[in-house]
Image (spheres, rainbow, N blue to C red):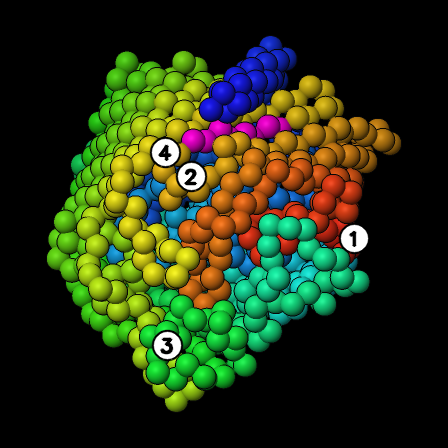
Amino acid sequence: MTNIATSFKIVCYILISLLMWGINSGYAQEEHPKTADSTAISPLFMPVFYAPIAPQFTAEMQYESIDTLNVMGVHYSDPQLYTENIYQSLGSFGQAHQSMIYQRENQYGFSLITLPYPLLFRQQKDLHFYKLKNVYTKLAYNFGFRQEHEFQATHAQYIRGATVAVNLHGYTNPGDYTNQNAANMIADVLVHYEIPSGWYGFRASYIFNRLTLNENGGLADYSNSPMQQQSTTKLYRVNSNYGSSKIVSNDALFQHYVNLQNRNKRYFGTILHTFQFQHLKSNYIDYLIDTNYYSYCLASMTDTLSDTLAMSLQYYNIRNSLQWSSYRPFTETPDKAYFLHVDAGVTHEFINNIYPSYKLNMVTPFARVHIRLFKAIDIYGQFSYSLMGYNSNDALMSTKIEWSLNRSKRHYLGLAASYGYVSPDFIMAKNGGFQTYSDSLRTSFGQWDSNFKKQNFLKLSAYWNYGRYSVRFNYFMEHNRVLWGSDMKPLVNSKYTSILQLHLYAPLRIKGFGFITNMYLQYASNKYVQVPLFAGKVSIFYMFSFFARKLKVQIGTDLMYNTPYFAEGYNPAFHQFYWQERYRVGNFLYFDVNLSLQVQRIAFYVRGGNLLSDLLSDRYYTTPAYPMKSISNLNITIGIAWRFYD
């Protein structure tokens, strides 16, 4: 404990020193003021702003600007590379991943399964609404020397009163090891239109996710000792030579509303109806199976000598919500000293779980409030309570109070609290599980012995934000959390567990030099919460120009490090991470370098990843049995990005 306390003090001192240096520098990396004249800044800059959309509430639009001048960020060919994202993965982009940082954001309603693709799998809460004067289009293509291909396209346009936004993300990756291929396609479209009189409008959106993955189950000879080196990664034995997954989801939402107003445009609130249809189908299949590797599920079958194993999930969800709001949809937060906004409504859900067969209905009343006092204090509150069905008596509530020290500079102090009394994912319920095939034998794996108690989650936060700088302290408490054990059966953490978390995000910019820091300190009082004591990323770069500033050049490095801990293992048949205390990972410095060039609206880059992989050791894992990519295996990527504004 003495070493931990000493390390904690040293890291805190370093973080505070860096933070004060950045504040005193007087430059908080504010890309461009929202009211700036684009021609006064540069003929290449176009004001483009976006805001996330809440699928349930009519939340106020809080826009962020897209930096259309800065070349920084073009070399992040995958979201896992971003400085903001600290994740454990299977060592290959496009495969399963989860955050190393303890997170708990409960959402109301039915949940069949939480899939481990948060940076790939799109949901309605991930969609953005754009505010722009002209057309905004961004195209990007990335090529890895190991034959990785990635294509991204974003297009947003305002057409005769309608705002349209389309995103497309395609990815193929053969992987470094046997049976590690990935081919993913994610697409979404959003349309919003309001008639000129303003009394009626609608929003329609659709999301398609398709993941096609070869799943090798990790290295068969993995241990805490360094691997015996092979001449090529394809010679390492893996747990599955033929395992594969296909996951397809469709998510369609239509929301229309009527703004109640008289002839003098006096506003009396908004009535909204929201319809949402969600469908998910997941199939896993493996041939010539290793019965030892799959012993956890074959033990429930009589045909233990089968050569084939298949596991399936399929369900659809139909959701209808009716609500009244005192806040006009798709408008920004008003600049008033006092106001009161209220949302209240009810949601009905019909869920048809096809594999295995189970149908249920749910009703969830919900409410939200936003109060502003004295122009500087904002108070938020939110509540939902589910009736009927599997999630009966689930309750979610949250509150936040925020003091604005300088709203134009986004300088805030805040306190927040949230509490969840919720059921685990339905796949862990007594009637949940997977439909399992073993040759001609069909059964259902997952008929657990008993129903689980409600999970309890509490989160308390205190934070300080200044521009993009952020310091946050979080306290989490959990009780009766249900997780996957190493035998792939639900495991209940029945003890009250406390998690302490300190977070610093500091983007320093001094002339051409940049230093972005994203660091976490974490402590959990129970072994069933597996997080590293320290995890952080740092991006360092320098930018300069040639030919009358027409050619911009950026050189930079990205570093990631986390202390050793028992990271969760991964089971591909379930698409789930599971608790284990056999293997530690961490204590390795990931070091990448990049070079970027920008000419007018076109940016090019080259990136070399994990340069220390062949110098320090070969134990570069973030998930047990799944090595990360190494520079000796041509972990080099080149790419191009092109933006259009008209």
Image quadrant assignment for residue 376: top left
Rendering coords of residue 426 (x, y %): 27, 60
**Left or right of 620, for residue 156:** left
Say whether marks 3 and 2 touch (CB < 8 Å).
Answer: no
492 is higher (above) or lower (below) than 184: above
Dominant secondary structure, magenta: strand
Q: Which residue is mark 3?
A: 436
Helix, strand or loop at label 4? It is loop
Gap in angstroms between the C-alphas marked 2 and 1: 32 Å
Residue denoted by label 2: 102
Where on the picture, by quarter, is residue 30? top right
Q: Which residue is mark 4?
A: 525
Point out the stretch of residues depicted in magenta.
Answer: 516-523
Q: Tell me the CA gap for discs 4 and 1.
A: 40 Å
Q: Is 13 on the left-hand or right-hand side of 488?
A: right
Q: Residue at x 46, y 34 (%)?
A: 63
**Mark 4 or 1: the one toward you:** 4
Label 3's element? strand
Residues packed near mark 1 inside 10 Å, few (<14), some (14 to 19) or many (20 plus):
few
Above/below status of 570 relative to 17: below
Give the mark, 4 or 2, whose residue is nearer the N terminus: 2
Closest to the observer, 116 or 281: 116
N-terminal of the pair, mark 3 or mark 4, is 3
Identified by mark 3, the residue type is Thr
Which mark, by number, is residue 632?
Answer: 1
Q: Earlier in the sequence, mark 4 or mark 1?
A: 4
**SS class, disc 2:** loop
**Tag 2: amino acid:** Tyr
Query: Please, is residue 379 above or below residue 332 in the view?
Result: above
Q: Is residue 396 left or right of residue 289?
A: left
